[in-house]
Amino acid sequence: MKQSLQLKLGQTLTMTPQLQQAIRLLQLSSMELEMEIQQVLDSNMMLELDEDEAQTFDYTAEAPNLPGTDDGAGYEGEAAEAGGESVEDYVAPSTTDDIPEELPVDSDWDEVFDNTLSASGPGSSGEEGSGEFENIHGSAGSLRDHLLWQLNLLPISELDRLIATAIIDALGDHGYLEISVEEILEVVRSGGIEVDEEEIEAMLKQVQALDPAGVAARDLRECLLLQLRELDADTPWLPEAQKLCEFHLNALGNREFNQVMRKMKLGQDELREVMTLIQSLNPRPGSRFSEKPPEYLVPDVFVRKVRGRWKVELNPDSVPHVRVNPYYASMIRRADNSATNNSLRTHLQEAKWFIKSLQSRSETLLKVAAAIVERQRAFLDLGEEAMKPLVLHDIAEVLEMHESTISRVTSRKYMHTPRGVFELKYFFSSHVSTSMGGEASSTAIRAVIKKLVAAEAPDKPLSDSKLAEILGDQGINVARRTVAKYREAMQIPPSNERKRLG
């Protein structure tokens, strides 16, 4: 094999630590970003929280004039006109103006940022006391604790208490008994205690008498009957409701209203009253004890209408403001090459990078949000039915960014609008062709389906085929299976389960 020398030209993108940090900050949610900033504050002496909340750029801006949008009436940009200091002037006092911008700190980067946020999200942090507000539960404890507390107040023997505890341990999250009486009997006998089935049945009735009503039921019928027995005897339509739950619950669940009225000898208005009483019961009595704590969303962007124009604002409270500590920065000496002075220089440069990355994240988020608002003004004005088709490539082309950057910016970032709080991903949807040659977004089609279902006759709900036919009459060409997919995505039951009394 003959050896030779060849010269090749090529372009490569080097993932420097600065670029890696900027990309990582870009894809973090506001909660994760706050945790990341706290970690950097703990590891870099040069950084501190800015109590005065000095801003490096304007957080409030109208959507800029974007090429390629639907009309030429854009928004006047304000972000580029921020009269504040530049990043370099802001982060470094006058005593450090002569420090070189690029310092050999790549080898020390991992030593400073060694505790990066994992992909598991905010729950991965093990810091004591973190997330105290989010961990506040509305309920006083689990269903088991609630039942055992009541059980300890009853004057029963230790054997009965043991049997009742075994029954409580066999309850599911919704409060239903998940095993049979025979299996409970085997569990108790496995502990060397001789009991019979009648004792298990007796203690099961005792547990069923505890709060909440309907707990320890073996099926829905028994759960509803237990709750009906707790009502006052003079409750209107109570006997009819008990009879319906006892003998005709399956027919009621199958929407066979005519059969139920015939067998119970009730009129339509009377059956409606009985059903109203049954619907006031709780089919999952233990659900309130297993509810997850609410998740609070902090919007990253605010959108509001000012003088007839939609204005986009970043939420300054979602990003803690940081700055360079001027005292530590003033300790750096130009001609000093000691280890201490070099460490201070390293921390200062990394602090500059971090602040630049935060500013870049905020500016990119503002640009993307403004571009989305420009394309979806009809949604903000008219609602979901006016949502336009939009994909990541559309925004990337307008802003001259890569689609992966748009994807990172729109993931787990939320926009507060007069119509509610939405994830930025919500404004992106596929399109369906219309008979007029235009396009309709899947979000708008789902909104139309939801509106049609809400206005349908209770006793004659619209089938998926009928919905597809109505959409076709409106110029939206969509197949029946597509309608079924959209309906299931909105958790709307099929037509046979939506049938109600007229």
Image: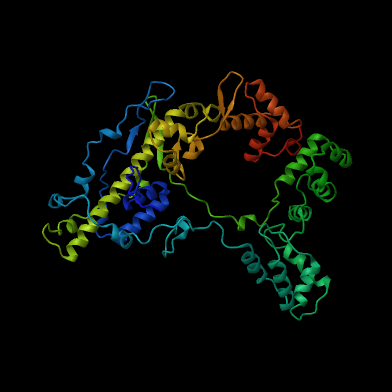
- Residue at the (69%, 51%) spot, across then down: 282
Q: Is residue 106 left or right of residue 386?
A: left
- Residue at the (76%, 34%) spot, across then down: 501
Q: Can residue 422 be seen?
A: no
- Residue placed most toward the observer, 154 or 45: 45
- Residue at the (33%, 46%) spot, across then down: 6
Residue lying at the far bottom of the rendered structure: 192
Quarter of the picture containing the C terminus is top right
371 w.r.t. 149: above or below: above
Q: Is residue 377 left or right of residue 179?
A: left
- x%, y% of residue 358? 32, 47
Q: Is residue 374 left or right of residue 463?
A: left
Residue lying at the far top of the rendered structure: 436
Residue lying at the far left of the rendered structure: 335
268 w.r.t. 278: above or below: above
Q: Can residue 16 be seen?
A: yes
Name the colouring of the figure: rainbow
- x%, y% of residue 135? 49, 58
- Residue placed most toward the observer, 141 or 271: 141
296 w.r.t. 257: above or below: below
- Residue at the (74%, 55%) spot, across then down: 230
- x%, y% of residue 115? 37, 61
- Residue placed most toward the observer, 209 or 400: 400
- x%, y% of residue 37? 34, 54
Q: Quadrant of residue 444?
A: top right
Q: Quadrant of residue 288?
A: bottom right
Q: Quadrant of residue 372?
A: top left
